[in-house]
Image: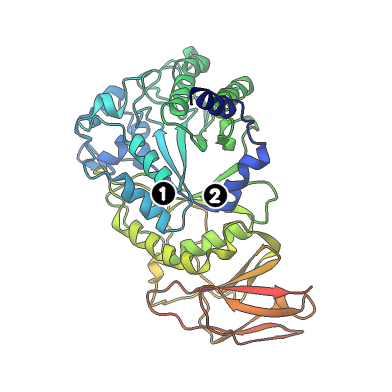
Amino acid sequence: MLIMLVTLFSFKGNAQPKSKNEKMDWWKDAKFGMFMHWGLYSKTAGYWDGRKAVGAEHFMLYERIPWKEYGRIADDFNPEKFNAEKWVKIAKNAGMKYLVITSKHHDGFAMYDSPCSDYNIVKCTPYGKDPMKELIAACRKNGIKFGFYYSLGRDWQDPDAKTNWPTKGGRSNTWDFPDEDAKVFNQYFERKVKPQVKELLTQYGDIDIMWFDTPSLISSKESEELQELIWGLQPDCIINSRIGNGLGDYKVTEQHIVNSVESKPWEACITMSKNWGYIEYDTVFKSSELMTRQLLEIVSKGGNLLLNNGPSPEGEIRRPAEERLKEMGLWMKKNSEGIYGSSPWRRSCEVLAQKPIENDVDKPSKENTMKDAVNDATSKVIFPEVRFTTKDNYLYAYVCSVKENNITIKSLSTKEMKIEEISMLGSGKKVKWKQSENGLEIEMPKFSKNQIPIVGYKIINTK
């Protein structure tokens, strides 16, 4: 028996790490993930000193709050309603395949038990526990991949975290540490970054993603050293491009969707509401219809959507976010076949009408045309269009936000292909269709008030 155990452990220890393409397979198939910004800034809920704070979750910078004063927020941070299982179930039921959460944001406060820095949730708060342990366990139980967000180039608690954007010291703590020229980034890198990244990769078992933010002044050598550290500890861990200096496994766009199909792996991180973290008065959320359309746009262009929400200081996902994710999940159960594991078609989109939909009684226009998102460059206008994907020699056409009884998809004319069969995803109903030189004409289904008005079609063609 002892010999058998030794053999098993030896085999595991000698297992070869996956190639870059192999380790990216699950990520490229997943398409949809949950992003979570949660920290001390959640506790203040967008306020400071009895008024609305400037800078939302970044208010420590904009209000120039000394880090020790800011750190006293931890005295009252006690998320007793935190339920890791519920968080993960909400993500899973929405159709999400992975979850990424802030282990340390720009304020420098660790939301996990960090042996190298007492400035953390276990040592500083009455909560006194490590929520990441429960969250990772819940993810593993439910088959959800897990990743840590880590603010790399910004840390307002550290005296050596210097920045140069938009100007010299523009994102640094210059009120506690005013001499920007005296700061040595490598000292912060050696004192805090490397030890904390090592902690994140050794305290919790397998970690699927290291999601870095704001590389700022990290050098090429330091980026390379950090990547080697990660892969030395966990060879199959995926790293995003914000490790800096052209490294990483995939590109990130923030509050922006690329204009055309990308051949290399990419991900758009986008907020559900105005801000990344919890802001009490941030009450305008994108509709489930709009967010589903954004998911389809991203997938049709070869990317993943990392959709953000900011949990409350009590540890709950806000009701508007939960409601919309539930609606998206119901839609995904019927329509996800052409999303997971899919690839872009030769054409990502066909616009059916340029005129935006107005006075939408099912989805109020104030939701569909949200304009107040911070740095959110994604379109909030809803108009009829078709998004295309392919998988296993099938073509998938997602018809979005159509009010007419019949539509014609010009891209699918007999001049382009010969269609043999069409089925509606998630439905046994027969599809009424006709193909001609002018396009594919389809009779559209009716949608109830609470349904997302997007339907997916699976198409078998011979050309």
State the residue at coordinates (60%, 23%).
228
Q: Residue at x 39, y 39 (%)?
A: 136
Disc 1 residue crowd, few under 14, some 14–19, many 20+, Cα 10 Å: some
Most foreground residue, 154 or 175? 154
Relative side of 83 to 237, left or right: left
Query: In the picture provided, is 184 more to the left or to the right than 11?
Result: left
Closest to the observer, 299 or 366: 299
Horizontal relation, residue 170 to residue 265: left or right: left
Please name the residue shown 27% across and 31% down the image: 129
Q: Residues within 10 Å of mark 2 (few under 14, many from 20)?
A: many
What kind of element bears circle 1? loop
Image vertical order of residue 92 relative to residue 382, above or below: above
Tell me which amino acid carries mark 2: Ala
Whichever of labels 2 and 1 marks the residue nearer the N terminus, that label is: 1
Q: Residue at x 53, y 59 (%)?
A: 295
Q: Secondary structure at mark 2?
A: strand
* Residue wearing tag 2: 268
**Which residue is the site of mark 1?**
142
Give residue 439's position: percent from left, percent from top: 71, 81
344 lies above or below 196: below
Number of marks present in the image shown: 2
What's the amino acid at mark 1?
Answer: Asn
Q: Is residue 250 visible?
A: no
Task: Determine the image quadrant of residue 340.
Answer: bottom right
